Amino acid sequence: MTTNATTVPAYAAPAAGAPLERTTIPRRPVGEHDVMIDIKFAGICHSDIHQARDGWGTGIYPMVPGHEIAGIVTEVGPGVTRFEAGDRVGVGCLVDSCRTCDNCAAGLEQYCTGGSVGTYNALGKDGEPTYGGYSSHIVVDERFTVRIPEGIALDEAAPLLCAGITLYSPLRHWKAGPGKKVAVVGLGGLGHMGVKIAHALGAEVTVLSQSLRKEADGLKLGADHYYATSDESVFEELAGTFDLIVSTVSAPLPLDRYLGLLRTDGAFVNVGAPEEPVSLNLFSVIGGRKTLAGSGIGGLPETQEMLDFCAEHGLGAEIEVISADRINEAYERVLASDVRYRFVIDTSTI
Ligand code: NAP
Ligand code: ZN
Ligand code: ZN
């Protein structure tokens, strides 16, 4: 067991909006219930970019982003019961929570009311900043570690730890399945996993993208229909169509127009996290008894369920593996919607 803190290489944003650069960070000693993970791959989520550039106004610097972590356990603390050295594991957006509130007790740690701890850009219960997956190793409590089934390659599994669970959770909660018409807005990292998962759940899936540029991909990923929202007539043609719309868009959307695409009792679930507020005409939800909701990542039990579901259905992310020196370039490409469909850092290059 590691009794001393270790120093490991990482990529960090030294200040808000500054390019990420190589540095070193401390990792705590492996405690009673901790596992040490040799990180193999780390996905780049759009949330990393929002936070590295302080778009949400909550940045702690230097910041080591990364909450889509896949790797191999190298050491376990004496109290660890679920993992051993050599296990394939993942870590998502959370590394701790209060563990006692109603939500934690229900496995909804993402909605912990007693204070959850983000994998990065947060302060741990020890008061030290947390540092994410753009690094070679991480020490995490086993309660916040999940098992990556053998059937999924580690690089294709990494994005499931955020993009995968963020779509799986609302699709399950709002019962996407046979006979349901589901639209996914935005075909990026989250959106492409939404298409795959909704299709695997048996729903009729429509992609609503800004353009038809990625139409062939969308249909291959499992969509039944694909529309460009730049074409105004789409909002008339599809009015009253969907049972469920999940928006993954990272920028403010004209909500009223999208709510018009729901049928009676339909739900528009937002998972995108734009930096600016949006406006809403409440008449858009009155007519048709519509629901406007949000959803955040997923709890630990559901994250494991999602990984097992993906393994069973042969689902991994569509990825472009990059070396760490290309992180800044990858950020620009994500911002330009030029990602097919998740950048994943090969952390051996850090
Ligand atoms: P992404 O890969 O950049 O995908 C977002 C997609 O939204 C783009 O590919 C693009 O799709 C579409 N889009 C971008 N700008 C748009 C605009 N101005 N108008 C309309 N559509 C636009 O990002 P991501 O990693 O999937 O993350 C998406 C958002 O979800 C981010 O805000 C992120 O912070 C947030 N997020 C939330 C949670 C949660 O728990 N709720 C978890 C993870 C991430 P098209 O090219 O197809 O139009
Ligand atoms: Zn994320
Ligand atoms: Zn809690």
Image (cartoon, rainbow, N blue to C red):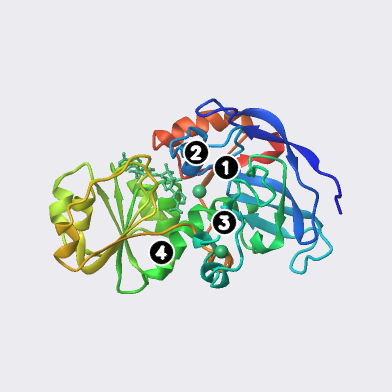
How far separated are the C-alphas under marks 2 and 4?
23 Å
How far separated are the C-alphas under marks 2 and 3?
17 Å
Quick check: 350 left or right of 277? right
Nearest to N terminus: mark 2 or mark 4: 2
The residue identified by callout 2 is 51
Q: Are marks 1 and 2 in contact (CB under 8 Å)?
A: yes
Quarter assignment of residue 344: top right
Q: Is residue 195 above or below residue 341?
A: below
- Element assignment for label 4: helix
The answer to whether the residue bearing label 3 lies less than 8 angstroms from the nearest atom of ligand 3 is yes
Q: Look at label 1 and name its amino acid.
A: Asn
Quarter assignment of residue 79: bottom right
Q: Could you tell me residue 263's position as x and y percent?
A: 19, 66
In the rendered view of the protein, which quadrant contains the C terminus?
top right
Circle 1 Cα neighbour tier, 10 Å, few/some/many (<14 / 14–19 / ≥20):
many
Q: Residue at x 55, y 61 (%)?
A: 114
Which of discs 4 and 1 lies nearer the camera? The answer is 1
Q: Could you tell me residue 339's position as x and y percent?
A: 45, 39
Q: Return the mark for residue 121.
A: 1
Q: Return the mark for residue 100.
A: none
Quick check: 181 left or right of 311? left
